């Protein structure tokens, strides 16, 4: 059982719709040039929500939430922050993200009235659906810390030759994003460097990469 003092940043702890909404938000932020935000919390148990509510009231510390009834507990909300050198809760950045969220039907706590204002907070209603004109364009890497930037891995194409499954790319940007994704996993010791060497040598296959994504996700959890 998770401690009430432990912060959960695992996107898979949210509902399926919330996971899609969060990935879509990060994708659209990435496309808008905002690749330096990251998740600080997803799911909260009711016990943890109560614990946070008590801070600054019956327990010492600064108040961090205005309610005991948060959609974090219903797995439909997530909080974000901004990577250095910007302020952790840089309002200029959060406002830009909030404006993007509004277009996607995602509610931003920065639009809430005084007393409920919560700029790092985003959530979806139970009726949320992928808005018309939008889709997940590839694998969206949603950072859980300021050390990682948002990545969108897309347009990975296989060659025509049936006996050759080595990875091919339609553009240099996508190739660089995939390499950065693998390098970060190597740096965090989630996978062996030999996989990055195979990528650089042009011998990493699409099947290899799909397997590595699963391993990285499991070991990052």
Image: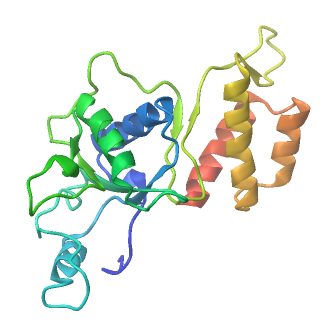
Q: Position of residue 125 (x, y in %)?
A: 15, 42
Identify the residue at image location x=62%, y=20%. 155
Nearer to us in this view, 192 or 108: 108
Q: How is the image coloured?
A: rainbow
* Above or below, comparing residue 127 to residue 38 in the picture: above
Q: Residue at x 43, y 36 (%)?
A: 29
Q: Position of residue 207 (x, y in %)?
A: 71, 32
In this picture, residue 98 sits left or right of residue 163: left
Query: Image quarter for residue 198?
Result: top right
Residue 209 vs residue 140: left or right? right
Q: Position of residue 33 (x, y in %)?
A: 51, 34
**Height in image: 199 above or below 195?**
above
Q: Looking at the image, is 109 positioned above or below residue 156?
A: below
Q: Quadrant of residue 176?
A: top right
- Residue at x 46%, y 31% (from the top left corner): 32
Q: Quadrant of the N terminus?
A: bottom left
Residue farthest along the top direction in this orientation:
160
| Res. 219 image quadrant | bottom right
Q: Is residue 189 above or below residue 214?
A: below
Q: Say whether residue 47 is left or right of residue 207.
A: left
Please name the residue shown 36% across and 76% down the image. 2
> Quick one: 11 or 102, which is closer to the camera?
102
Q: Position of residue 182 (x, y in %)?
A: 72, 45
Residue at the extreme right of the image, as rendered:
201
Count of number-bearing discs: 0
């Amino acid at each position: 059982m998770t401690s009430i003092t432990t912060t959960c940043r695992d996107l898979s702890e949210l509902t399926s719709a919330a996971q899609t909404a969060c990935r879509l938000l990060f994708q659209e932020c990435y496309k808008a040039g905002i690749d330096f935000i990251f998740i600080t919390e997803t799911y909260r148990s009711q016990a943890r929500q109560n614990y946070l509510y008590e801070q600054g009231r019956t327990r010492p510390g600064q108040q961090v939430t205005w309610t005991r009834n948060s959609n974090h507990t219903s797995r439909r909300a997530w909080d974000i922050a901004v990577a250095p050198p910007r302020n952790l809760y840089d309002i200029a950045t959060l406002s830009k993200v909030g404006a993007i969220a509004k277009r996607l039907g995602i509610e931003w706590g920065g639009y809430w009235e005084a007393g409920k204002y919560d700029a790092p907070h985003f959530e979806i209603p139970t009726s949320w659906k992928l808005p018309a004109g939008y889709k997940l364009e590839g694998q969206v890497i949603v950072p859980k810390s300021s050390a990682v930037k948002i990545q969108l891995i897309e347009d990975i194409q296989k060659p025509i030759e049936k006996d050759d499954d080595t990875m091919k790319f339609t553009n240099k940007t996508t190739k660089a994003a995939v390499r950065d994704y693998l390098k970060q996993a190597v740096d965090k010791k989630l996978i062996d460097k030999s996989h990055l060497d195979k990528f650089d040598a042009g011998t990493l296959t699409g099947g290899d990469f799909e397997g590595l994504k699963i391993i990285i996700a499991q070991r990052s959890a």
